[in-house]
Image (cartoon, grey):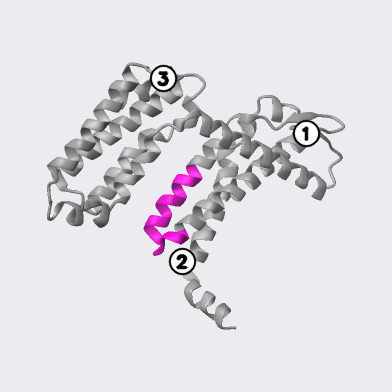
Amino acid sequence: MAFFPIEALMTSANRSDYYSHIVLIPLVSAYFLWFARDRIFGEPEPAPAPGVAVAVAGLALYAVGLARVFGLNENDHGSLLTFASIVFWLGGFMALYGTSIWKKEPFPLIFLVFAIPIPSPILNRVIYFLQVWSTEAVGVLFNLLDVPATRNGFYFYLPTVAIEVAKECSGIRSSLALFITGVVAGHLFLDKGWKTWVVVAAVVPITVVKNAIRIVVLTLLAAHVDIRFLTGGFLHQSGGFLFYIPALFLLGGVILLLREIPWGQVLQSCIVS
């Protein structure tokens, strides 16, 4: 059910770059299902009535999507059909193994949400948010480095080069990757739900700083070494992973701090004092 809408979305010229992670999500979810198989499948408690009801709801939503009642674009059409497919699958799972899965080990099922393409209104707002704050961070770095640059909106004018912090500079792909990585790492390594939320929240400033550093580095290389660093060089087109790796280490540092420091005792000491 989900294969064809996702395939159409993945092969579209303007959206495939945003959703290259989708094919990995079911595999990760399947791993966590296998990892928790004793708790999930050890004592199944079938729940046919609620399970079938959820599955029928998924089928109905899928039929609405196929009929293109709402006139959605390709991205949002794929989102609707994928969401309906997951609802249908969850209904079948609940019918066979019961609703207690939501108490025993809900993470593998909830994680499937990341396989749903982000609806356009949400995606566009996230991209714009990252674009705005990445531009602000670039301005701060130019000031700190004493780089002579004049700003006009998303444009920066240097003596020998001008740049635009475009939507493509928002870092949406790395943001999604860091976000998903933070969720998985929080589930694996952290013992409190609020700590995972802290990790997820840390993705935003880490992504903004990473974007700004990449833009500033490319701009200075173009201005002082070779303009091709901006017009078609490897670092501009395919070098994002070189800046992503330090961002991943920063996220790992946040997780390490949350894991090793006894925050309960720290907060209690602060309250007492």
Q: Which residues are magenta?
A: 177-195
Which numbered disc flags the more N-terminal residue, 1 or 2? 1
Q: Is residue 7 visible?
A: yes
Q: Position of residue 225 (x, y in %)?
A: 78, 33
Q: Position of residue 175 (x, y in %)?
A: 53, 42
As drawn, the label of residue 259 is 2
Amino acid type for the residue under numbered disc 2: Arg
Whether residue 220 sits left or right of residue 53 in the image: it is right
Mark 3 secondary-structure assignment: loop
Q: Is residue 1 visible?
A: no
Front position in the image: 57 or 270 = 57
Residue 80, image quadrant: top left
As drawn, the label of residue 70 is 3
Alpha carbon distance from label 1 to label 2: 43 Å
Q: Position of residue 202 (x, y in %)?
A: 56, 53
Whether residue 15 sits left or right of residue 208 in the image: it is left
Residue count near mark 3 (Cα–Cα under 10 Å), binned few <14, some 14–19, many ≥20: few
Q: Is residue 183 magenta?
A: yes
**What residue did someone put label 1 on?**
225
Alpha carbon distance from label 1 to label 3: 52 Å
Whether residue 174 sits left or right of residue 184 in the image: it is right
* Tags 3 and 2 touching, CB below 8 Å: no
Amino acid type for the residue under numbered disc 1: Val
